[in-house]
Amino acid sequence: MPVTKQKLIRHYALDRCLRNQTRRYYIEDLLVACNNALAAKDCQPISIRTLKYDLNEFETLYNTIISHIPDSHGRIYYRYEDLKFSLQQSVLSDDEVAKLKDTLLMLSRFKGLPQFEWMTELVTKIETKLHLDAHTEAIIGFESNEDLVGLEYLEVLFDYISNKQAIDIDYQPYDKPLFTCTLHPYYIKQHNSRWFLLAMNDQTQKMMLMALDRIQDIHLSTIAYVPTEIDFAEYFDDVISVTIPQDAEPQHILLRFSVYRAKRHNPTLLTSLALVSFCDRKG
C-alpha cells in the first residue's frame, strides 16, 4: 500500500520513539508524538485506533519487529526489537522499490549519450545505496540514436532554458547558407530520433524550430531573456510532427479504410466506416 504524506510524517515520528533507548514510550506517548509531528505540518491529528493500525502496518512496510514490553506494573511500552534499526535505512515499501526499479530502467536509456555521463554514475549510486538490482531485462524499447550529430548540445540547451538565458546560435540549414541569430530558447522536443529546439527569434519575434544536428555553435547572449506564456504540454497536441505553421488552425482529417482492414483490427469500426463510405459517395 502506498505511503501518503501524512502517514509518512507519523511513521517518522514513531521511528524516533521506537529507537529511543533512554525513554519508554507507551501508546499514549506515541499518540502525542505523532500528533505533535502532524500539527507541525498543519495536518489533522489521529486517533488511538489509527495509531494501532500504523503500528501493525509499520512492521510489514519496513520489515522490522516492534516489541511490546511490559513494565513492572504490567503496562506496555514499545521499542524496536532490533535497536540498530532506523527508518532512515529502510524507507521504501516493496511496491515503491518495484516502481523505482522501473524508473531506473527508463533513466538508463540516457546512458552513453554525450553530456549524460553523470546519469550512469547517478543510477549506479542509487542502485548501490538502496541495494537495488535494476539490471533486469528491458520490456520497453525507446527510440534513440546515440550517434546522432548535435546530441552534445542537449545538456547545454537544457541549462540555458532552465536558467532563462538568451543565446546566440550558428545554424546551418539543409539547403541554405550558414547564419547566426539570437534566440530565446523555450523547449526541446524529440521526433523520429532527432532533437529539436523551439525558440523565439529575437529579431523577428517569431517562433523558430531548430534541429540540433544543424547547430554549429552556441554562445550565451548578452541580451535579456524574454519568457513565453506558451504551455508546451498542450502546444503539440494537434500535431504529429514538430512543425506548426504560423497562425494555422487545427484541421479535421477524415481517414478512410477498407472494410477488410477494419474487420481485422477493430470490428467496432465497421459501422463508422460504412457511414464514411456513404458520406464519401454522397459528397
Image (spheres, rainbow, N blue to C red):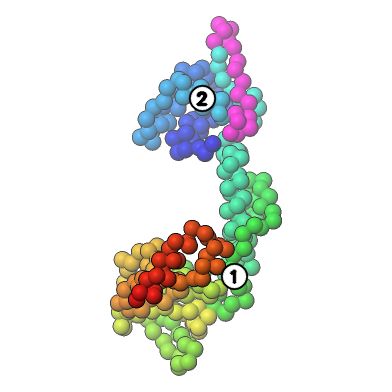
The answer to which image quadrant residue 107 occupies is: bottom right
In the image, residue 67 lies in the stretch drawn in magenta: yes
User: For the point 67% across and 46% down, which residue is it?
Assistant: 131
Quadrant housing the N terminus: top right
In the image, residue 164 lies in the stretch drawn in magenta: no
User: For the point 47% across and 38% down, which residue is it?
Assistant: 4
Side of 170 relative to 92 (left or right)? left
**In the rendered image, which residue does mark 2 sit on?**
53
Q: Is residue 110 above or below residue 90?
A: below
Disc with the residue nearer the chain's start (1 vs 2): 2
Residue 181 % position (x, y)? 39, 84
Q: Give the range drawn in magenta.
A: 59-75
Q: In this view, does 42 lie above or below 193?
A: above
* The one of 65 and 233 positioned closer to us in this rendering: 233
**In the rendered image, which residue does mark 1 sit on?**
144
Residue 142 % position (x, y)? 59, 65
* The one of 262 and 127 positioned closer to us in this rendering: 262
Q: What's the distance in space between the residues labelled 1 and 2, CA to CA?
A: 47 Å
Whether pointer 1 and pointer 2 mark residues with C-beta atoms closer than 8 Å, the reply is no
User: For the point 48% across and 24% down, which residue is it?
Assistant: 51
Q: Residue 48 has which mark?
A: none
